[in-house]
Image: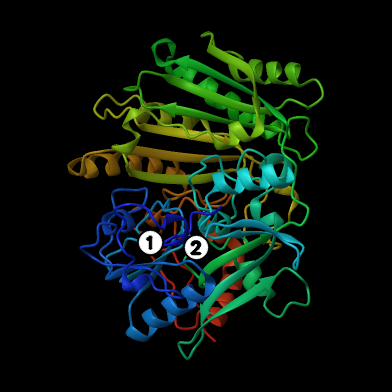
Amino acid sequence: MTRRLLLGGALAGGAGLIAPPASASPGESPTVRPGDIRYPDLVRGDNHRFTGTPDYVRLAGSTDQVVRAVTEAVRAGRRIAVRSGGHCFEDFVDNPSVRVVIDMSTMNEVYFDAARGAFAVEAGATLGEVYETLFKGWGVTLPAGAWPTVGAGGHILGGGYGMLSRKHGCVVDHLYGVEVVVVDASGTARAVVATREPDDPNRELWWAHTGGGGGNFGVVTRYWLGPDLPRPPATLLYSSLMWPWSGLNEVAFSRLLANFGTWYERNSAPDSPYAGLFSGMGVPHLSSSGGVVVGTHFDAATPDAARLLSDYHAALGEGVPLRPLTTGPVPMPWLYAASWRGGGDGDLIARRFKFKAAYMRKGLSQQQTATAYRYLTNQAYRNPNALFVMIGYGGKVNTVVPSATAVAQRDSVIKSAYQAYWADPAEDPKHLEWIRTFYRDMYATTGGVPVPNETTDGSYINYPDADLADPRWNTSGVPWHTLYYKDNYPRLQRAKRRWDPLNVFRHALSIRPSTP
């Protein structure tokens, strides 16, 4: 059963229930306006730095309702934004100029569509719901992200990756089709289905959704994936290594980060015995109570898995005099591992954040490890929730040519991320200054951003960073759209011109229409 808005039916007969408002009449999507008890929860996503002030929020329950909501907003000249899971890192949905938010969270069905021979996922489904339904129903899954509350609607659009990507590629490598509500040059909204079939006249709209990012072409209401989706491992071996800050100096720190990068440079071929290994290194600020942590999930069915995992651990610690604190390896069922949500007691409070990212073709340079050490041990800036992360990538992802999907980065071996979380709005300038200068100095030789070259390859649109379009922080001369899309950008622009000629769907990093 889905979590659609059941304003009657199963709720009928409950004592003290309030009658549905007129805005929730059959065929119409419920409308939430200022003053409604629901409004504060529907105008803010996961990043509490941004709170929207739309005239209203439409909770869409069907594609027809989305068409009507878009039509009404366009006719009234109101700017539209769409929310699925609410995990956008920037203010794309909660920008002050947005007057109408279409909330997709109640369109969350996951099922096999026999007519199309593929699995259908509605845009409001969370990754946790997708994993559970696909696994329990058919024993299959997607190589998608590790945070179960993320909405599939935005995650898939940006390419999507996760624990199984080294073995099974990006999510969009399995995307068969999309249903999108678009607006034509006359301002008319309609639903369009686009598939990867070579003779589909709408095929370019499908291609644009294979990594083009959200908020660009229309409102995605449904995805079709497969038909042959991968089967996940029955069991994963989970392990964790931690080298405490108390025992690390700069030499040991630099060696740890270099070891991680070197290992992925050598072990990210698609036929590597380590294709079933997913691992990330998290390096929190010195003011935390921890240290450098490497968490790993490894397919237990891999031949000689225990030895391979032990060799991986040994390679990470080679030349480091400090022995790590070790957990595992612990056998863990697939669905449990895929559905686990981390976070401590402060998760509900420390929800203001800034996020930056880069694709890495090689490990960090000596200059970069020195820069990371300087920022992460800076005693003048104390934030236990600030960290640098490197995540293993490559494998099957890199078997796809860059033009086959809108995801252009197809030879990287690591994704890196820079993160800072905090609670007090008054501290925004301090934390933003730290992460912005940290990132700028990490890429000081290329204008403060990860310009595509032999070592870096731009950034990931699902980790959007508006600073890349700001000349104060990007002095490289390379435009933001090259960092995200490289040579695929002109093709995305042509798709934009055809499918959103009025530029209805836009934000700080949206695709700009090409000129005729």
Name the residue rendered at 73%, 30% in the picture.
274
The foreground one among 460 and 202 is 202
Q: Give the residue type that dot 2 points to.
A: Gly
Residue 265 on image: x %, y %: 67, 34
- Mark sitting on residue 92: 1
33, 286: nearer the viewer: 33
Q: Determine if residue 474 is in view.
A: no
Picture disc at residue 447? none
Q: What residue type is labelled 1?
A: Phe
Whether tag 1 and tag 2 are in contact, CB under 8 A, the answer is yes
Residue 253, can we see it? Answer: yes
Check disc 1 and report its element: helix, strand or loop: loop
Left-right relation of 355 to 460: left
How many residues crowd around disc 2 within 10 Å: few (fewer than 14), some, or many (20 or more)? many
Residue 143 at x, y percent in the picture: 66, 45
Kindly identify the residue that appears in the image at 50 percent across and 72 percent down: 218
Question: What residue is shown with label 2?
Answer: 214
Residue drawn where x is 63% and y is 40% of the image: 393
Query: Could you tell me residue 331's position as x and y percent?
Result: 66, 21
Q: Which residue lies furthest to the bottom in this view?
A: 186
Rendered-image quadrant of the C terminus:
bottom right
Q: How far apart are marks 1 and 2 (CA)?
A: 9 Å
